[in-house]
Amino acid sequence: MEKKPKRIGVYVCHCGGNISDYVDVEKVRRSVEGEDAEIVVLAKTTMFACSDANQREMVEDIKANNLDSVIVSSCSPKLHMLTFRNVSVRADLNKFTYVHANIREQASWAHSDDKNGATEKAIHLVKAAIAKARYAEPLETNKIRAVKTVAVIGAGVAGMKAAISLAQKNTDVILIEKEPFVGGRVAQWDSLSTTTETGKEMVKRLYNELLKYDNITIMTNSEVIENKGSVGNISLKIKKTPRFINATACHPDDLKRAIEVCPVEVPDDFNFRLNSRKAIYKNYPSEYPQIPVIDVKNCTRCGECEKVCKAIDFNEKEEIFEIVAGSVLMATGFDSYTPAYGEFGYATSENVITLPQFKRLIDTQFDKLIYKGKEIKTIAYIYCVGSRQTDGENTYCSRNCCTSTIHAALTAKNKFKNITNYHFNRGLRTYGKQEILYADSLRSGDIYFQSYEDGLPKVSVEGAKTIVKVNDVLTNNREIEVEADLVVLVTGMVPRSDNSIGTLFKLPKGRDKFYNEVHMKLRPVETVIDGITIAGACQGPKNITESVNSALSAATKSYTILSRGELETDPLVATIDPEKCSWCGACEEACPFDAILKVENGKKVIAEINNTVCKGCGMCAPVCDPDAVNLIACSSREIMSMIDALV
Amino acid sequence: MSKINPAFNKELEKFGSVNYNACYNCGNCTAVCSLSTEDDSFPREMVRLSVLGLEDDIRSSLKPWECYYCGECSTHCPQEANPGELMMSLRRYLTAHYDWTGLSGLMYKSLTLSIIAFVATFAAVIAFAVSVGFELEKMLHFGHMFEGIAIGTIGFTILLPNIARMWYYTILKPKTKVTFMKYVKSIGELFIHMFTQKRALGCDDNQFRWFEHFILVIGYLSLLFTTVVLNWFGTSSLFVIVLGYIMSAIVFVVTIDFVKGRMKAKKEVSKHSQPSDIFFVVWLFLMGLTAFMVRLFIDLDILESNKWLYIFHLTVLVQWALIIVPFGKWTHFLYRSFAMYFAKLKAD
């Protein structure tokens, strides 16, 4: 049965003069009133459609004329579509019956040189909107149940803070750490700037706090290997590698001996390969969890440790856990840039190391600063190595390295005698309170040289001497030569080289290759993947303060998603006509959000849309040969009638 | 290619530099300096050379002398790096460096040594007084003779060679080509700056200080002329007597203001006064005052019964002539004006 014709109201906005200076709005109004008289029961012009007065008038019009749908022809829908959808709701209409026509950006502004043309185009756009409104159906939002658990991936300072914050909000937290110990990068630092607490102490404090909450599950040596489902209901498969040490049977002295007798030596990543460690190890005495671990990749199973320690148990097996979370909070951190072979003498000169290595060096030395058997007195720091590259890929500034270098330089100066620091920088960025550190460094006699990208310092080796040369901008571009015992390359932060987790969750990356937020300013911790938030340096270079800020923010955002126990999603998604579909897989390939599932419906294999994941982008519709895909609110019928109105 | 010397700041600290390492090269000091020009800019450049310890560049530079320490740079320095005081300590450093005897440097760096020198000269004066049996006539005669001999000896053995050294470091060593005619043509600069300190007028709001200084220089030079050439203490010419009174009065009255400034230490120029600065103004004041008093006592005919006054005056005079003039701040008078002369030679 044919439905009775819809009653539609059209408003044509002047937008002050933004529209009416170029588009004859009265002509637009008349044209739609005349031709579509059978359904357009009301057509008005208005100075400002978005004004309070007009909004009130619209509500009255809708009620008085018993309208089924309204159209406002004004600015971009990005600006006011929501405004007018809400007007519809206030007049007891379904908000999806509202249709927007953009005659400002698409007509008046775009064709200010051709008033007649602009008016003509505006008329067509409004008619297309009427054509769409003719078929616009009232829609209801989808509701889904949300699991009140957050999976936090990465137990660095950001992950730990986020976990604590979520636990305080009575949310279950599963804190997943790939490494055998918690603490991430911060555990690697001793002294930190602007606090007397060391990085290790900070990690200890956070770990003890984590233990206070029953609703936090800490999983170390664990990795996410599978990800299914969508916001509210994300299933993760977690692989837990055993430590091969039975914690309950563990006697500390025996374990110490086990480490001593281990004959395997592998480069120590914790100390950035400055030295080596055993295959059974702990990075530092107070590390958490306080049980050592056997590094299976390098262990030769020689059995020496088993002889001295009963706790060693090679029978422990890898375990797979399946968990369900409503939201995932990513806090996977960063890697330090590794300079290229020969970059400022890296790897080619024995007196050249990176900043993280230098920090570990000063933390592990006492009385005298010794590197490769030589006492270090003068240190040259070369800034922005691997950051702000003009030729390379890393064009960004790594934010924390200026401060970190100055802090390390001052720490070295205070800890060891007669240290002279030379800083070869490209302009210092010790923003905020960190400026105090820079001032301290200057007053203590540190010397700063500056150059630009086109005159970077040069490191050369002459006999036993390592020489750094630069044309110093601050001294009238004079060539200055400095002899240094040690050259420290100030390397910045780069994304983790192992991006398997990002691939697994299909997290989008920015130009800097770090994970990308939806909106840098207004949605800084959300990703385009619903339910997945990002925190800390996996999003881009951050210092501890900034990491914690973003972690607390991401925790709140993840909590917000789950707090009501129920999620509402937009009904504007794709649908599949099971009659027409015969599964060819084209739509699955086209879908950027993994929203298409292959299902057996009893009769045949067809495609099915996961409504919570589908964004209604429409990529699947044109690739469907049998035309089985329909986009809600953009159905073929609606779009075709709009095209008819436009051409 | 320049090799830097970070230890230089320890050396310069001994000459009174304060915290110049804090400089982060913003250049505000140079921007606010009313004497700095685009072609000849300071003090940031001098701060930078000092931070790096590029001594050869500092020694060949005339810029420290081109600054008249209005203190605007220090007031506006966001890092409190005291560029003004840096320029002042560079002047002390250069003075020490020009001095072939090395005594300037020793006395700038060590207050103890300066005090020993002052005590030793005082002891010498007493010893001399004892040797002539405190006879006023002999003491007056010797005092007058001493003035002439001291001027000649100090001038030829210390000051002239030091000026020659300054010329060597700033003109000859940097291989500046200057024709003989240029030396002749530019000589006017030397005397204009020596007697008028014209350049100091370029500093903002400095007219009064410049005027005071100008009067003081004129008063001092006239007093020198009156006592040495016209033998003020021995003359009976009323004109000379009155001239001496006026000039000595000018010297001690005007210096009061300078001494007060140093004591209050409110202006940038006097905030970080070194002993050499204090000695200079105090001894100048004492010179003027004691000379005035001695002549007054002669005119009142009471000097015979107050010989101590003359001994005091003679002590001040000897200390002035043997310590402050050759090795102390007095040399500014010469180096500044020669610097302006040399700068003219270097220009165009």
Image: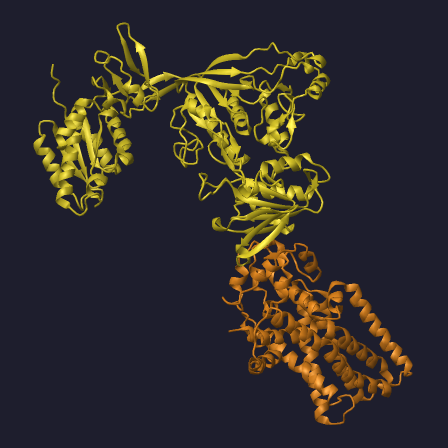
Hue used for the chain lettered B: orange
Query: Above or below — where is B200 with respect to A506?
Result: below
Question: Which chain can be seen in yellow?
Answer: A
- The residue under the point 71% across, 45% down is A417
Query: Above or below — where is A249 with respect to A542?
Result: above
Colouring method of the image: by chain
Residue A645 appears left or right of A473? left
Q: In the depicted view, which residue is nearer to us: B23 or A384?
A: A384
Q: Tell me where residue A248 appears, x and y as whole percent.
A: 66, 12
Q: Tell me where residue B298 appears, x and y as whole percent.
A: 80, 88
Q: Residue furthest bottom?
A: B237
Among the 4 quarters of the image, the one containing residue A205:
top right
Q: Can residue B256 be seen in this view?
A: no
Q: Which residue lies furthest to the top in this view?
A: A602
- The residue under the point 52% across, 45% down is A429
Q: Number of numbered discs present?
A: 0
Q: Tell me where residue A599 appears, x and y as whole percent.
A: 31, 11
Among the 4 quarters of the image, the one containing residue B67:
bottom right
Residue B312 appears left or right of B22? right
